[in-house]
Amino acid sequence: MRLRVRFSKIGKIRFIGHRDVARVIERAVRKVGLPVAYSQGFSPRMKLSFGLALPTGYESEAEFVDLPLVSGAVLDGNAAGPVIACRSGTHAPCENMAPSSAPSYCTIAEALSEALVVGMEVSAVTLTDGRGPSLQAAVHSCGWDFDIVGLDATAAAKAVAEFLAAGTVVTERVHKGETVSSNIRPSVEVLQVVGCSDRGAVLSAELSATPRVVRPSELVPALAPAHEMGIARRTHQWTSGAAGRAEPAVPAMCAQRNKEPISG
């Protein structure tokens, strides 16, 4: 069995890299005392399985990590399934929670949030059976919000319309020290203007994660070559399966209502 944890990375914490995030998660798990499995060998490491790596400098409301539990670990009597929680204390108690001296999932989510650094919070915990593809392999697209510095909403809407009408949009990126050109238009499933921040127009996009991950930073030069991207925030990681399009874990309603818009 695995605990699937959804967490956010908002604010200055966006400047730490993926490896540092892994260390922060490990420290929080040890502090809370969860019965997570370790690797074997001379230098055992906690077995963590993350979703798609978040680029340094990007924010996120939808980061995921799977925590495999040690054999025989029992947290409560619930079957596998979604268990959602938030920190506000205003949400209803978890349904079907059998009385137990073991910590409930709400307690685990709240305890992990308290153990994490400022800017990282847990919004959902799901118990899974550990079957199926890894989180990285399962994600087919990501939702993003990002702003473009100095671009007003009218100009942004015009640029979006021209982008969506184009059959081909070729951009360049540096990959392993080489400049690579590619057509990113087929990878942009949704693109629209949703508001303004104190820096400029805020856009929302759904970008493909296969065959390669497309990032908002690749869109900005195609939309507004004379402008720079401000803050980009991942809002979703989408998977598809027998049940259709879904997220690995959905945050509590109160956590969704309290989402912070992109701002200064």
Image (tube, rainbow, N blue to C red):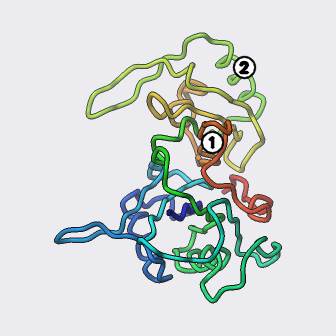
Question: Which of the 4 image quarters holds residue 113?
Answer: bottom right
- Residue 106: x, y in percent? 68, 75
N-term mark: 2 or 1:
1
Q: Which of 255 and 47 is in front in this view?
A: 47
Which x, y percent locates residue 211? 45, 27
47 or 161: nearer the viewer = 47
User: Which label number is shown at residue 70?
Assistant: none
Query: Measuring 51% from the left and 36% from the top, which residue is drawn there?
Result: 215
For mark 1, what is the residue? 144
Badge 2 is on which residue? 161
Callout 1: SS: strand
Give amino acid for label 1.
Answer: Trp
Please give the name of the residue rendered at 59% of the width and 60% of the height, measured from the top-left corner.
6
Residue 98 lies left or right of residue 217; in this view the side is: right
> In the rendered view, would you say 31 is above or below 198?
below
In space, the residues marked 2 and 1 are separated at their CA atoms by 18 Å
Residue 181, position as x, y percentages in the image? 39, 20
**Residue type (three-letter) at the residue carrying disc 2:** Ala
- Between circles 2 and 1, the one closer to the viewer is 1
- Is disc 2 surrounded by few (<14), some (14 to 19) or many (20+) residues within 10 Å? few
